[in-house]
Amino acid sequence: MNIYQALSESYSLLINKSKTYKLDCEILLADTLHIENRLNLFSNLNKKLTEDEINNFFRTIKEREKLKPIPKITKKKEFWNFEMDVAKKVLIPRPETEVLLDLVSKVFKKNSNISFLDIGCGSGCITLSLLGIFSNSQGEAFDITKEAVMNTQLNLKKYHKLKQVKVFKRDVFKFKTHKKYDLIISNPPYLKKSDYINLSPSIKIYEPKNALVSDSKDGTMFYNHIISSYKNNLKLNGYLAFEIGDNQFKKLQKLLSQNGFIIVSKFKLINDQIRCLLAKKIKNYALQ
């Protein structure tokens, strides 16, 4: 079997399973053959595959038939300027999170030495990207699951950044610190329980529910706690950066204002929903 035949057969297997079936097959075959750019497959269509390559490729196609996301099959996802390992039970990094980092990059000077706290670090994509933008910075990152902590450490180690960040397992509702940061950033769970029902099976089966679902009311439970409980861990004129859910902006805007913040930038999706916001701390409040 050559590359052309392998692609043709895989297309037929996935055509009714995925709207992007051709792209899926090409990515998986390129990954199997250790080809960086899938387009290079088309200049080598007559290349013969070994038996192991055939078996490995169609094993990944079977996984995709079961709706497993491509990054969970290849165990990697491109994010910012990094190739993130997403093998463990963590969320696959989304493009909106790159937008959040872009907002942050515009309020600190290039190569600033900032201190940051990443709440709910997941794969480590935010922490690693911050160190990519602000290379001499120091940070802390935590998550409630052992898998997320290990995944973050793995990605930091891969890019020789582990010494710059303390990564630990904590519950956001119990963790307390007296440290002060220039930036507190988080992409916490923000879906209502009712929203979870309508998610695609590929998300519900292969990505952690506890990283997606907040509460049964309006999805703002984590924001309420982070804003009220961590505001004193942010330096005056420091920044709070959030990725947020649909229809949450107005409530969070009010909550931020009540706690001494002003929103300095935001990102709106094509459907007019605000997905990312950046707030600046302009008032100090005495510790309660």
Image (cartoon, rainbow, N blue to C red):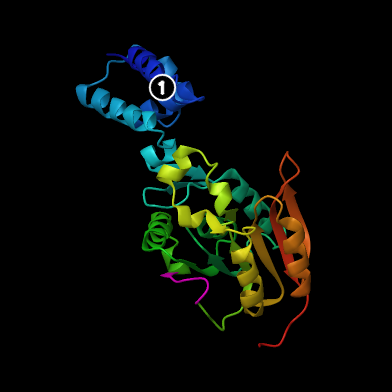
Label 1 packing within 10 angstroms: few (<14), some (14-19), many (20+): many
- Quadrant of the rendering where the C terminus is positioned: bottom right
Could you tell me which residue is drawn at 37 percent across and 32 percent down? 66
Q: Main secondary structure of the magenta part?
A: loop
**Left/right of residue 274 with respect to residue 132 in the rendered view:** right
Furthest-left residue in view?
Answer: 51
What residue span does the magenta drawing correspond to?
A: 168-174
Quadrant of res 254: bottom right
206 and 1: which is toward the camera? 206
At numbered mark 1, what does the secondary structure look like: helix, strand or loop? helix
x and y percentages locating residue 57 in the rendered image: 31, 27
Quadrant of res 113: bottom right
Residue 223 visible? yes
**Left/right of residue 213 with respect to residue 43 in the rendered view:** right
Could you tell me which residue is drawn at 53 percent across and 80 percent down? 176
| Magenta region includes residue 230 | no
Q: Is residue 287 above or below residue 90?
A: below
**Left/right of residue 166 with respect to residue 115 in the rendered view:** left
What kind of residue is marked 1? Answer: Leu
x and y percentages locating residue 196 in the rendered image: 53, 48
- Quadrant of the rendering where the N terminus is positioned: top left
Residue named by callout 1: 14
102 and 191: which is toward the camera? 191
x and y percentages locating residue 283 in the rendered image: 77, 78
x and y percentages locating residue 203 in the rendered image: 47, 42
Residue 124 visible? no
Q: Is residue 175 above or below residue 252?
A: below
